[in-house]
Image (cartoon, rainbow, N blue to C red):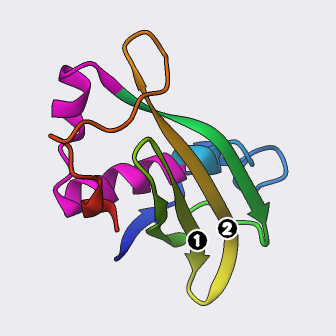
Amino acid sequence: MKHLTPLTVRPYECDSYGHVNHAVYVNYLEYARMQFLHVVGFEYKRMIAAGYFTVIARLDISYRSPAYADDELEIETQSRKVRRASGIFQQVIRRGEDVIAEADVHWCLVDNQGRPVPMPEAFDVRKLL
């Protein structure tokens, strides 16, 4: 499943060169992943209440083109791989047909002590595919 999240670049997200600062893209990607989880019905808040958390283990971003204030962007999010305790989201940020950035976001599940653990049966990770 692919999910599209629209987003308008806010002027304060731009750096002194007039384009979106590279670090801001991490926020865009996070927002789009949370929207994806909401749409597929993954109960993230319930998982946190049960003492489990997803953490980002690795983030690979390729910047292709700058984005500027007031640009209308669209972030495509899909789950590329899901295992019992980890997975990969693939995300693409576009302005129209132009690819602004591409990212592979590797996540893993940890318990409230920060130790990697398999996903409990109560949380169906198949919803992410």
Q: Is residue 41 left or right of residue 84?
A: left
Instruction: State the CA–CA distance, disc 1 to disc 2.
Output: 4 Å
Range drawn in magenta: 28-52
Q: Quick check: can you spot residue 49?
A: yes
Q: Is residue 113 left or right of residue 1?
A: right
Choose top left, top right, bottom left or bottom right for residue 18. bottom right
Q: Amino acid at mark 2?
A: Glu
Contact flag, marks 1 and 2 (Cβ < 8 Å): yes
User: Of helix, strand and loop, which one carries label 1?
Assistant: strand
**Residue 60: image location, x then y, percent:** 73, 53
Choose top left, top right, bottom left or bottom right for residue 69. bottom right
Report the residue that reaches farthest toward the bottom: 97
Q: Quick check: can you spot residue 68?
A: no
User: Of helix, strand and loop, which one carries label 2?
Assistant: strand
Residue 26, relative to residue 102: is it above or below?
A: above
Residue 13, relative to residue 111: is it above or below?
A: below
Q: Residue at the spot x=24%, y=62% of the render? A: 127
The residue pinned by badge 1 equals 92
From the image, which quarter does the C terminus lie in? bottom left
**Residue 122: image location, x then y, percent:** 15, 40
Q: Is residue 104 left or right of residue 16?
A: left
Choose top left, top right, bottom left or bottom right for residue 47. top left
The residue pinned by badge 2 equals 102
Q: Amino acid at mark 1?
A: Val
Q: Residue at the spot x=56%, y=37% of the render? A: 56
| Helix, strand or loop for the magenta stretch, by majority | helix
Q: Earlier in the sequence, mark 1 or mark 2?
A: 1
Q: Residues within 10 Å of mark 2 (few under 14, many from 20)?
A: many
Q: Is residue 68 in the magenta section?
A: no
Q: Residue at the spot x=78%, y=64% of the render? A: 63
Q: Nearer the viewer, residue 82 or 75?
A: 82
